[in-house]
Image (cartoon, rainbow, N blue to C red):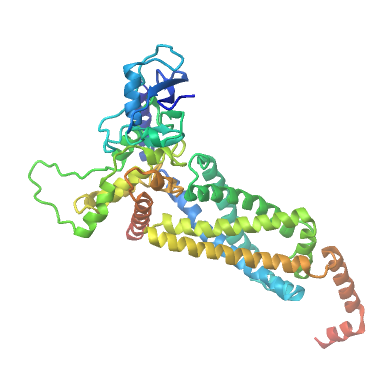
Amino acid sequence: MADSKTVEIRIKRQLTPDGPSRRETFRVPLRPGLNIIGALMMIAENPVTAEGRQTVPVSYDANCLEEVCGSCAMVINGKVHMACSALIERLDQPIRLEPMSRFPVVRDLQVDRSRLFRDLQRVKAWIPIDGTYDLGPGPRMSQREQEAAYHFARCISCGSCLEVCPQYNDQTQFVGAAVLGQVRLFNSHPTGQMNAPERLEALLGPGGIHECGYAQNCVEICPKDIPLTQAISEVGGQVMRHVLLGFLRK
Amino acid sequence: MKLNEARLAFMSSSAESTASPDRSFFWRRLHSVSGVFPVGAFLLEHLYTNSYAINGVEAYNEKVRGLTELPMVLILEIAFIYIPIAYHALYGVWVWWRGDGNVTHYPWTGNWMYSLQRWTGLVTMAYIAFHVWEQRFAGVHIIENYFVAFSKVQHSIARPAVHAFYVVGLLSACFHFAYGLWLFACKWGFAPGRAAQKKLLWACAALFLVLSSAGLMSLRSISTAPLQPRPEELLKMRSQKSVARSQGPEAAGKRSAF
């Protein structure tokens, strides 16, 4: 057991995307306010396991260190969390670190989130404003809608909502809550609205909104407190209206 | 390497989807709405009809008679009961199969409900299969012999294991319907707001309590009523009576009156 001055961290390691995984235990000195990223940096400084065996530094993604970039999500003590905002003092020890399970591992704690970005492309999660000529200012957005939309603009694409989703797997190809939140955001924007039918059409395809099981884990885990279940419900209504009215107007 | 493979797979799958449009949205939403109508509607009707057991054997059998006398009863049964339930059940198994329940890792209320909705669906399916086989297809047929209805249920639940299965099946069905109604309202966008969803959840909880207590009361009325003769005995008594009637002088007199 680690004494009061050090903390024990067990990390699931995998050197190559298709290689075998193993666990390594490290012991790092405990400093006040230490977070997981800080501990990983200390391990990188001195990559020696608790048993005294020399190893290579642990690979992980991180950037902003203030829960804004969304790159350092990992499974900490069995639960997905941003490593930067996970303070060691608040965690049960020994601490167990694993990569997110719903994405392919690149190396150690680093995962390949291409599926999320591909799905954002699938639903056209952007507003096309570029043209060969000046398109002029877009329509104004009401204060109320700005305030409602702001929540969804805070998404950092960390993938936590996808990690906890029981429906997000290879079989369903479900796009997941983060993507549905972005559809909610761009469909309510006065300029983005113009492409709403295309986004809704994409959600009728494989892995579309119908794959949601409404377990509501997404809204529980979201580090940015985005009302994701509300987004899913609203977009669900939009898709239904699009389908039914489209059918009647054909 | 893996990334390129994934990209290629995605490109080929999107090419396929333009060739033959994906209908999963339609089938999944059909599963959702079929749970409300006709399957849910039938559950309400079924619990209502069964509650006549509270008023006694005669009241119950008369209510069953009313149903057996519906015009085109077989077509109604097939179109509004068998096909929708079979579709809802089989597609539901597919939905359950494709999900990765993770309530042990993330034990939040919504996640518990997600898992419960799947487990109650499976239990209800097993229960309905048993219930329909035993009450509709096995033994004395109710459609031709409405008067054995009460006795048939009573003798079935006289076995403690079957009685327990009825209670479990009933509670599963009521839970699955009540929570399913909430899911329907949320997923179809009828109640997107958090406060509205919360209120609706309470309403659905109340619906669960009302439906399951009505069902349990009906069940209790049947199990505590004086034991009826077995369906086969009732049938025999009935046929002896009608034979006696057709051979007796009254029957002869009635026939001559026509």
B129, B51: nearer the viewer: B51
Identify the image quadrant of the C terminus of chain B: bottom right
Identify the image quadrant of the N terminus of chain B: top left
Left or right of A39? Residue B116 is: right
Instruction: Give the quarter of the image for residue B13.
Output: top left
Q: Hey, which residue is sitting farthest bottom in the picture?
A: B257
Task: Measuring from the top left, give residue A241's x and y in whole percent.
Answer: 35, 58
Residue in the image at 43% along x and 40% along y:
A164
Task: Measuring from the top left, give residue A215's x and y in whole percent.
Answer: 46, 48
Residue in the image at 50% along x and 59% along y:
B181
A28, A37: nearer the viewer: A28
Residue A41, above or below A217: above
Q: Hey, which residue is sitting farthest top in the picture?
A: A54
Total labels: the figure holds 0
Can residue A58 be spotted in the picture? yes
Task: Measuring from the top left, give residue B67's x and y in whole percent.
Answer: 66, 70
Left or right of A140? Residue B12 is: right
Residue A6, above or below B183: above
Residue in the image at 35% along x and 60% along y:
A248
Q: Hey, which residue is sitting farthest front in the picture?
A: A4
Left or right of B38? Residue A86 is: left
Can residue B192 be spotted in the picture? no
Residue in the image at 46% along x and 42% along y:
A167
Task: Measuring from the top left, give residue A246's x and y in whole percent.
Answer: 33, 56
